[in-house]
Image (cartoon, helix red, strand yellow):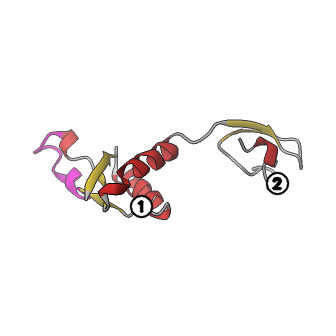
């Protein structure tokens, strides 16, 4: 096992570990309950950590985590209703139409 990163809170750590696992990289959260002793140890030592099971997947896990933390920012116009969509979204919030294929990059 190898530590990949620390997370600001347990919710984010769990989300990252779940997304890594969905991407084919076995990941777990360590220090799950350490925040309860944050006053007795330095606060940065009580942050939850994301660990991966296979050290050979470390570079792939780091790359996938970077993609999760920095989703693509796009701007496109919905072909269904003309709504302008900003951000990493691939579906129109107003009518549900999918982003055109030529915008995906």
Question: Which residue is at 44% across, 56% downward?
Answer: 15
Q: Which mark is residue 97?
A: 2
Left/right of residue 4 with respect to residue 35 in the rendered view: right
Front-lying residue, 103 or 41: 103
Left/right of residue 44 with respect to residue 41 in the rendered view: right
Question: Which residue is at 77% across, 49% downward?
Answer: 92
Q: Quarter of the image for the N terminus: give it.
A: bottom left
Look at mark 1 in the image and give the residue it sits on: 25
What separation in Å lies between label 1 and label 2 (alpha carbons)?
Answer: 32 Å
Magenta span of residues: 31-42
Camera-nearest label, 1 or 2: 1
Question: Which residue is at 26% across, 46% downward?
Answer: 47
Magenta residue check for 33: yes
Question: Which residue is at 88% across, 41% downward?
Answer: 82
Q: Residues within 10 Å of mark 1 (few under 14, many from 20)?
A: some
Front-lying residue, 50 or 41: 50
Q: Residue furthest front?
A: 56
Q: Which mark is residue 92?
A: none
Describe the element under mark 1 as helix, strand or loop.
loop
In the rendered structure, which disc, 1 or 2, sits on the residue that comes first in sequence? 1
Residue 2 at x, y percent in the picture: 26, 54
Describe the element under mark 2 as helix, strand or loop.
loop
């Amino acid at each position: 096992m190898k530590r990949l990163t620390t997370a600001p809170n347990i919710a984010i750590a769990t989300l990252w570990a779940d997304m890594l696992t969905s991407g084919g990289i076995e990941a777990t959260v360590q220090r799950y309950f350490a925040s309860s002793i944050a006053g007795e140890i330095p606060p940065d030592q009580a942050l939850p950590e994301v660990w991966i099971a296979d050290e050979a997947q470390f570079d792939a896990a780091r790359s996938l985590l970077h993609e999760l933390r920095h989703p693509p920012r796009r701007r496109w116009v919905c072909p269904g209703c003309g709504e302008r969509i900003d951000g990493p979204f691939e579906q129109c919030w107003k009518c549900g139409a999918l982003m055109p294929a030529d915008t995906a990059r």
